[in-house]
Image (cartoon, rainbow, N blue to C red):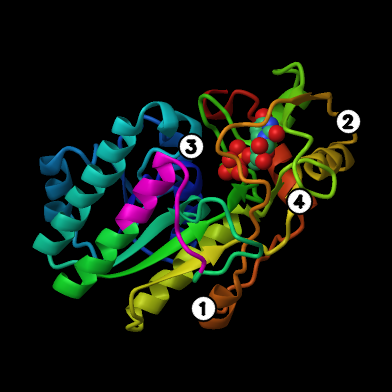
């Protein structure tokens, strides 16, 4: 049985779907504070919070857990700058309750949702795994701290882990069953698509004077299904006896905010109203991954590297679920 914390969230639910397709038994542990019951397409769902040690213990007592895929965390950079307390409590204390329960129950494998935010302002792109990690916000700091906790939990207790450092997760299930639904929404693609649905007046482009070809920020958008696939490969690697490690997860291809708006216009055939807005604090100009290590060591290849496909799948979800899971 695979325990998936945060399996009712955006990336978690897509990974649960992939695990189920592979024939795995899955139990999702999710507080449903930010996750959605309807996002869990199968397996068992236990509603609970990682801060509740008894609830965590109860899951390990009830199910025979072989490995853990750990998504449950707060993940908004801006919010973390305002309320770091929430991030350190939830992401670190909650995470510690999880790995301590693993220890007590003899579970020795975990895949962890880390982030490109652990690198901070990059010295150059593409970024590989040896790039120094200097987070510029509390969210990224919690992800880096937990990577370190996992490293030392291997040294002392033999728990093997793979930390996957995501760049910009995007898109939706190609079959249209699940997708992205955050409240409030802060991510670029859903904001563009909500604007096209008439739910917002325009897209505010955060800075048009960056040191990039068209002046807008460059990011590496990766399809959520390709992200999910990397989790399955990482899990299989640990099952084959791989050592603790970390991998970047991106397409290695940078797209500017303006290019994303153009691509959305191309995919939907609609004009995207947008306006220049001030830079968003904490945004680096360019974040692009080198995913060579993941490709070489785990044989990962993105199935949907084209941003147009990513936007097409996101559009399918948003246009059929304009209110997200509530609609
Ligand atoms: N962005 C923007 N307007 C928005 C939301 C995002 O211009 O309303 C930009 C943001 O500055 C960044 C890129 O779009 O350069 C992707 O932002 P997102 O929040 O989706 O992901 P992040 O890069 O912060 O993980």
Calculate the distance from the C-alpha at mark 4 to the C-alpha at mark 1. 25 Å
Q: Position of residue 52 (x, y in %)?
A: 16, 38
- In this image, 54 relative to 312: left or right? left
Mark closer to the chain start, 4 or 1: 4
Q: Secondary structure at mark 3?
A: helix
Give me the C-alpha separation between circle 3 and circle 4: 20 Å
For label 2, the residue is 270
Q: Which residues are magenta?
A: 131-146
Is residue 47 in view from this perspective? no
Of labels 1 and 3, earlier in sequence is 3
The residue that disc 1 covers is 298
Q: Element type at marker 2?
A: loop
Q: Is mark 4 within 8 Å of ligand 1?
A: no
223 relative to 202, above or below? below
Residue at screen point 54% across, 74% down: 294
Q: Give yes or no for contact between labels 1 and 2 (Cβ–Cβ under 8 Å).
A: no
Sequence-wise, the earlier of marks 3 and 4 is 3
x 52%, y 66%: residue: 131
Q: Is residue 190 left or right of residue 16?
A: right
Image coords of residue 139 (percent x, y): 41, 42
* 3D distance between C-alphas at marks 1 and 3: 29 Å
Quadrant housing the N terminus: bottom left
For this view, does 38 lie left or right of residue 142? right
Q: Earlier in the sequence, mark 4 or mark 2?
A: 4
Contact between marks 4 and 2 (CB within 8 A): the answer is: no
Is residue 80 depicted above or below 113 in this figure? above
Circle 3 sits on which residue?
77
Residue placed under numbered mark 4 in the picture: 255
Q: Which is in the foreground here, disc 4 or disc 2?
A: 4
**Is ligand 1 closer than 8 angstroms to the Cβ of mark 3?**
yes
Query: Quarter for ligand 1?
Result: top right
Mark 3–mark 2 Cα distance, whole angstroms, equals 30 Å
């Amino acid at each position: 049985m695979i325990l998936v914390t945060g399996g009712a969230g955006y990336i978690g639910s897509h990974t649960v779907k992939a695990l189920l397709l592979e024939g795995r038994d899955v139990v999702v542990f999710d507080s449903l504070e930010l996750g959605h019951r309807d996002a869990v397409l199968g397996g068992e769902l236990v509603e609970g919070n990682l801060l509740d040690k008894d609830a965590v213990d109860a899951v390990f007592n009830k199910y025979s857990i072989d490995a853990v895929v750990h998504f449950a965390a707060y993940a908004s950079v801006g919010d973390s700058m305002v309320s770091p307390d929430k991030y350190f409590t939830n992401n670190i204390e909650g995470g510690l309750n999880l790995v301590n329960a693993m220890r007590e129950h003899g579970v020795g494998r975990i895949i962890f949702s880390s982030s490109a935010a652990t690198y901070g302002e990059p010295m150059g792109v593409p970024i590989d795994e040896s790039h120094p990690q200097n987070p510029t916000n509390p969210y990224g700091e919690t992800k880096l701290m937990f990577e370190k906790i996992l490293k030392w939990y291997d040294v002392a207790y033999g728990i093997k882990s793979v930390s996957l450092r995501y760049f910009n997760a995007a898109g939706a299930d190609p079959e249209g069953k699940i997708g992205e639904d955050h409240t409030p929404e802060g991510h670029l693609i859903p904001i563009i698509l909500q604007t096209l649905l008439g739910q917002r007046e325009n897209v505010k482009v955060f800075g048009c004077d960056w040191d990039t070809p068209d002046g807008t920020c460059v990011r590496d958008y990766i399809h959520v299904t390709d992200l999910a696939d990397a989790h399955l490969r990482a899990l299989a690697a640990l099952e084959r006896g791989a050592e603790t490690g970390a991998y970047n997860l991106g397409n290695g291809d940078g797209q500017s905010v303006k290019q994303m708006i153009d691509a959305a216009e191309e995919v939907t055939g609609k004009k995207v109203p947008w306006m220049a807005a001030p830079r968003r604090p904490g945004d680096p100009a360019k974040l692009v991954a080198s995913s060579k290590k993941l490709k070489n060591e785990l044989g990962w290849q993105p199935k949907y590297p084209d941003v147009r496909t990513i936007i097409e799948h996101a559009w399918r979800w948003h246009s059929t679920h304009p209110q997200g899971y509530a609609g």
